[in-house]
Image: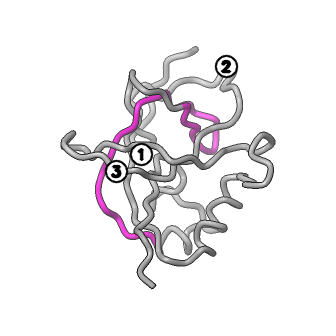
């Protein structure tokens, strides 16, 4: 049975060069499709960033990956991100489908994205929208 391809947009510690040892094996199983952007604000939460998505506004830069046809990968990513599908309201991050625009701006693709599920409080914005680059913050 041929299943529809599923995609994941990553912007933080699920990026291959940022993945900690505990999640790196799962991240290595993702197939990179390209660079993409979503609208929203990226916050520096210390050890990791958190995205709060919007329909318009500043952009968050990340990578688009094709997920392998293996539910254990998504389950591992959910565990790492603190997402409990049975109790999303209590989860640190929630996984939602979101339209992601490829870097050329010409094509969109629906991807799973982990969205920060708390108020960012006084966490500084990552002004560049790019967690992989040195951070220049702007206090909230």
Residue 86, percent from left and from top: 78, 54
Quadrant assignment for the N terminus: bottom left
Residue that label 1 marks: 132
Mark 2 element type: loop
Residue 8, percent from left and from top: 46, 57
Residue 50 counted in the magenta span? yes
Residue that label 3 marks: 109
Q: Tag 3: Cα neighbours inside 10 Å, few (<14), some, or many (≥20)? A: some
Residue at the bottom extreme, as displayed: 1
Mark sitting earlier along the chain (3/1): 3
Quadrant assignment for the C terminus: top right
Above or below: residue 43 compared with residue 103: above
Please report the residue visible at 39 percent of the width from the left and 23 percent of the height from the top: 56
The front one of 94 and 60 is 94
The front one of 25 and 21 is 25
Please report the residue visible at 80 percent of the width from the left and 49 percent of the height from the top: 87
């Amino acid at each position: 049975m041929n299943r529809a391809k599923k995609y994941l947009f990553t912007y933080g510690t699920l990026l291959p060069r940022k993945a900690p040892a505990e999640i790196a094996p799962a991240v290595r199983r993702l197939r990179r499709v390209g660079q993409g952007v979503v609208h929203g604000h990226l916050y520096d939460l210390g050890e990791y960033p958190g995205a709060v998505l919007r329909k318009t506004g500043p952009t968050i830069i990340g990578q688009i990956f094709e997920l392998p046809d293996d539910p254990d990968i998504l389950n591992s990513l959910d565990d790492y991100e603190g997402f409990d599908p049975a109790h999303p309201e209590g989860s640190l991050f929630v996984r939602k489908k979101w339209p992601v625009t490829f870097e050329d701006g010409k094509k969109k693709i629906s991807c799973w994205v982990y969205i920060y599920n708390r108020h960012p409080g006084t966490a500084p914005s990552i002004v560049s929208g790019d967690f992989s680059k040195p951070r220049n913050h702007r206090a909230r």
